[in-house]
Amino acid sequence: MRIDRAELRQVELPLVFPFETSFGREEIKACLLVRLFADGLEGWGEVPAGTAPLYNEETVGTAWHVLEAFVLPAVLGREIAHPAAFPPLVRHLRRHHMAKAGVEAALWDLHCQRERISLATALGGTRDRIEVGVSLGIEPTIDRLLTRIEEFLGRGYRRIKVKIKPGWDVGVVRVIRERFGTIRLQVDANSAFTLEQAEVFRQMDEFDLLLIEQPLGEDDIVDHAALQQQLRTPICLDESIITPDDARKAIGLGSCRIINIKAARMSGLTAGRATHDLCRASGIPVWCGGLLETGIGRAANIALASLPNFLLPADLSSSDRYFHEDVIDPPVVLNSDSTITVPSTPGLGFAVKTKRVERCTMRKEIYSSR
Ligand code: OSB
Ligand code: MG
């Protein structure tokens, strides 16, 4: 397909409730949306970078610059036979994985519409429903967190993830276990601890967590290996795994026993799938993480999570966990068995509500191939 035109938007959607992690608090979801036009079709992709470089080094501002100046010029006016042909076109551009992933996602959407297949089918998905959980932020008090957990268990979520940071850690886990018994529970530190604080995790070991996500430095797979040696609970890496090669090294060192795959963090669905395949061959289970995506980003994540080695519940919740009104139709809904149905219709499997997108748009630019 020949890419005729690209549209870039910065959008902002208010979150239903604020989301606080060890690195900060978000009340509004900000991201970029990429829309590509080719062969009379349009494809959508999301760049889930926020306003500040807190989860990783990218922001909506850096992504906009890199897309406008480097990534979009690499695809505009070009004939692209398959989305997997895109990563080589931008390989010389160092990092900026989320910016690249947004364009790749839009190419996958276009490709699947043209081939009249679902994104899940195109990626090699094998499931028509995926198990999901909910990721809950740090709250002002433990009581407020317990109320949230109760609410989401009541809505049917059967796996809870809670964010932790120094001082909001093993004590919180203990109270959750006392209150809710043997629910499936996991924690995510977003790199807030150091190896000197290993005692916190040794204490957590007795609470039968599914996993401990990214306890230590985002760039440190050596200390993670040392920590994993001291624990029964699997460590799961998120921020540390940027390429399939990172996964190979972390597995080889014993830095983790589980990997969280977010295609956007890893420069796109092709790299996300390659990481899935590598982990599968190494006997390492993966699961699909999230970055509070709008429906556009979440639709791509749902498709990816239908691959066979996604063996733990995903951080993909229903649209109403995030937004009063999503940008896709129908919204993502939770089935009564704590699953989300993988769409089988062509492309993303959801229609983009362009009027809703328009209302959320803070900035918009159109780029043409001469
Ligand atoms: O580390 O998994 C994370 C949200 C923003 C930044 C980082 C993370 C998260 C989540 C949210 O945990 C998961 C979701 O999208 O529901
Ligand atoms: Mg995480």
Image (cartoon, helix red, strand yellow):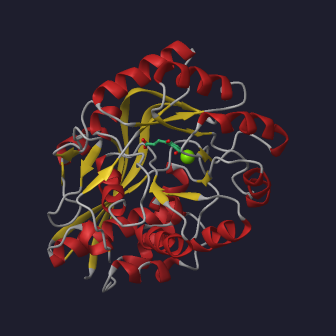
Across and down, in percent, residue 227 comes to 76, 50
Q: Is residue 196 left or right of residue 28?
A: right
Against 109, is 63 above or below? above
Against 58, is 15 above or below? above
User: Is residue 37 at all visible to an observer of this figure?
Assistant: no
* Residue in view at x 75 percent, y 34 percent: 200
Across and down, in percent, residue 143 comes to 52, 13
Write down the quadrant of residue 263 in the picture.
bottom left
How many numbered marks are there?
A: 0
Write down the quadrant of residue 165 in the picture.
top right
Across and down, in percent, residue 36 comes to 28, 67
Q: Is residue 188 left or right of residue 35?
A: right
From the viewer's side, name the closer residue of 73 and 87: 87
Q: Quadrant of the C terminus?
A: bottom left
Across and down, in percent, residue 252 comes to 69, 71
* Residue in view at x 51 percent, y 77 percent: 90
Q: Is residue 251 left or right of residue 148?
A: right
* Residue in view at x 57 percent, y 57 percent: 258
